[in-house]
Amino acid sequence: MRAPASILPLRVENLAFEAEGKSLLGPLSFELPRGGITAIIGPNGAGKSLLLRLCHGLIAPASGRVNWAVEEGMLAGRKRHAMVFQRPVMLRRSARANLQHAASVTHAGRRVEDALERFGLASLAERPARLLSGGEQQRLALARAWLLEPEVLFLDEPTSQLDPGATRQIEASLERLAAEGVTLLMTTHDLGQARRLARRVLFLNRGALVEDAEASAFFTAPRSEKARSFLAGDLLW
């Protein structure tokens, strides 16, 4: 069977969002190529989560466009990008049933057991999803997204409330997804995490895209004064 055309690159063109007449983001432009992990970083209120939601199509921009290489990122009526939220919503069902619900979208029921094993959830399969720990719920959210077979995965602060052990488990899963060809765009307030995982950095401040750079270059020699202040802990807004 012929492989579907890639939905990448994603081209964000003059994207802007406003609420109650106040500009909250943009206009900004960038391109997300295929492969690797891109981290969106910046102070609180910079517009990081807002940018993810606009790219995923959860909200409409005031102006500008989000352009996928394949119109709407669709394959057989299904989006090929998924999103994992900071606080994932769990159905009032077991962990396995949450995955079975996701699998029904892609008719991938037999992959549910693979997902449980892959994300370290096999021993928790029959537990109510809403009673799992924060780290376990986040792994379940990743497993659920994986079952949707996304080419692009958006992640909003996926480890913000987790302890170091749970954080490392999530990071290992993200690295594995990236190694297998899934393109990841994630927000994080953890600069150490961005250093460990990201190939590229988008630095936002006050709704503006200040820097778009390779991660190694950004962390060693940021081009802007705002980025240098942020890395030094001096830029709070």
Image (cartoon, grey):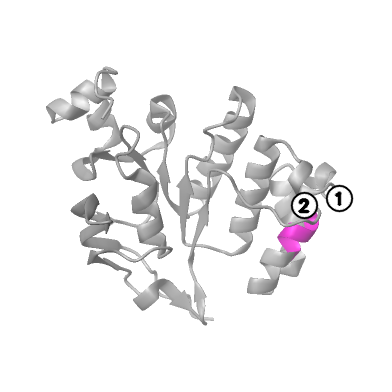
The image shows residue 97 at horizontal and vertical percentages of 79, 60
Amino acid type, residue under disc 2 in the picture: Ala
Is 224 placed above or below 16 here? Answer: above
Residue 111's label in the rendered image is none
The residue that appears at 39% across and 32% down in the rendered structure is 194
Label 2–label 1 contact, CB within 8 A: yes
Identity of the amino acid at label 1? Glu
Count the numbered circles shown.
2
Query: Residue 128: x percent and y percent?
Result: 81, 48
Identify residue for label 2: 95
Q: Quadrant of the C terminus?
A: top left
Q: Majority secondary structure of the magenta segment? A: helix
Mark 2 or mark 1: whose residue is earlier in sequence: 2
Q: Quadrant of residue 136?
A: top right
Residue 47 location (% of width, % of height): 31, 45
Q: Is residue 16 left or right of residue 82?
A: left
| Range covered by the magenta-colored residues | 95-100
Q: Which residue bears the numbered disc 1? A: 126
